[in-house]
Amino acid sequence: MKLQQLNYIREVARRGLNVSAAAEALHTAQPGVSSQIRLLEDELNVQIFERNGKRLVGITEPGRQILEIVERVLQEVDNIKKVSGEYSDEASGRLAIATTHTQARYALPPVVAAFKQKYPGVRLELHQGSPGHAAEQAAKGIVDIAIATEAITDYPDLVMLPCYEWNRCVVCPPGHPLLDEEPLTLEALARHPIITYDFAVAGRTKINKAFEQAGLEPNVVLTAIDSDVIKTYVELGLGVGVLAKMAFNPARDTNLRAIDASHLFEPSTTRIGIRRGAFLRRYAYEFIEMFAPHLTRSVIEAAMASRGREKEGLK
């Protein structure tokens, strides 16, 4: 049994049983991957993948159990490499972060700038996507940490650490009737077409919940995963936008006006997700503390050592 073979079966599983895609991701040839998987199955005397001819069509039950163990084995191998790197070169390496557009665009820039100034030798990677996608990448070990809201709590393989709470605002063109509503109400908002986040984006469930509890049906005419897209279509007069308050900047969004809506919706909590058992290098701890000062290394290590899921509130 070789580590290379374990890497092959894990990557094939991750790529939806597409051997060619797995081979491309691993920078090797497809026939070699298929051959090594066969050799591993012969050695173990068990079939890991179900086949229809030469095509992989599923994962067998023993294959699922083997893949679970393989994930743990390869994570520990990765941890060994990180421990070595921690002591051989503390100021270089790679830090991969999966996050959402709102976090990447509005919350992370000053942290990234400060981090790069302190650690110019560290290659920082930002993988942008939906909250679920960010959490999944962290759970699979593709990235070191995930930064997202709501969906991240659906992954038991992640330790969740609360960073900060945020709420929403309503944006509209200058002179819009909603600007005269004091205070703004859900009833007034429901009378206008609404542009807001897609269901895959954090915070949408809180918006829906508020309208449902008030017995109202919001007139959502357009959804997007990008706050800037929402603002663009509000500027075009297609509706009013409901988005994260951090996504509105009066100095930049001069063609729009914002109304605080934090009294209308429950706050959301942005969390950092770290895969259980993962080894973080010193600069990863520092990045997290730059982003959320209350999340010191000792706090993170205590959470990582805990067997139960992190359910503490915002500190």
Image (cartoon, rainbow, N blue to C red):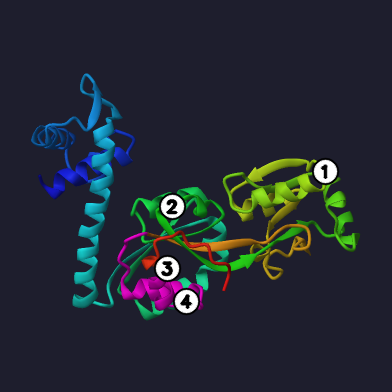
Q: SS at mark 4?
A: helix
Which residue does the numbered mark 1 point to in the structure image?
215
Q: In this view, does 56 lie to the left or right of 173?
A: left
Q: In this view, does 202 lie to the left or right of 82?
A: right
Do the residues bearing badges 2 and 3 touch, measured as CB atoms within 8 Å? no
Q: Which residue lies furthest to the front in this view?
A: 307
Question: Is residue 153 visible from the viewing direction of this image?
Answer: yes
Which residue does the numbered mark 2 point to in the structure image?
156
Q: What residue type is labelled 4?
A: Met
Q: Where is residue 48 in the image (x, y as percent from the top left)?
A: 22, 33
- Spatial CA span between label 2 and label 1: 34 Å
Q: Which amino acid does label 3 sit on?
A: Ala
Depth check, front residue: 276 or 120: 276
Q: Which of marks 3 and 4 is nearer the N terminus?
A: 4
- When the figure is inspected, residue 28 is found, relative to residue 232, above or below; the finding is above
Q: In which quarter of the image is the C terminus?
A: bottom right
Q: Which of marks 2 and 1 is nearer the N terminus?
A: 2
From the viewer's perspective, is the residue at label 4 or at label 2 nearer? 2
Which residue does the numbered mark 3 point to in the structure image?
303
The magenta stretch is: 276-303
Q: Which amino acid does label 2 sit on?
A: Pro
Packing grade of label 2 (10 A; few <14, some 14-19, many >=20) is: some
The mark total stands at: 4
Residue 277 lies in the magenta stretch: yes
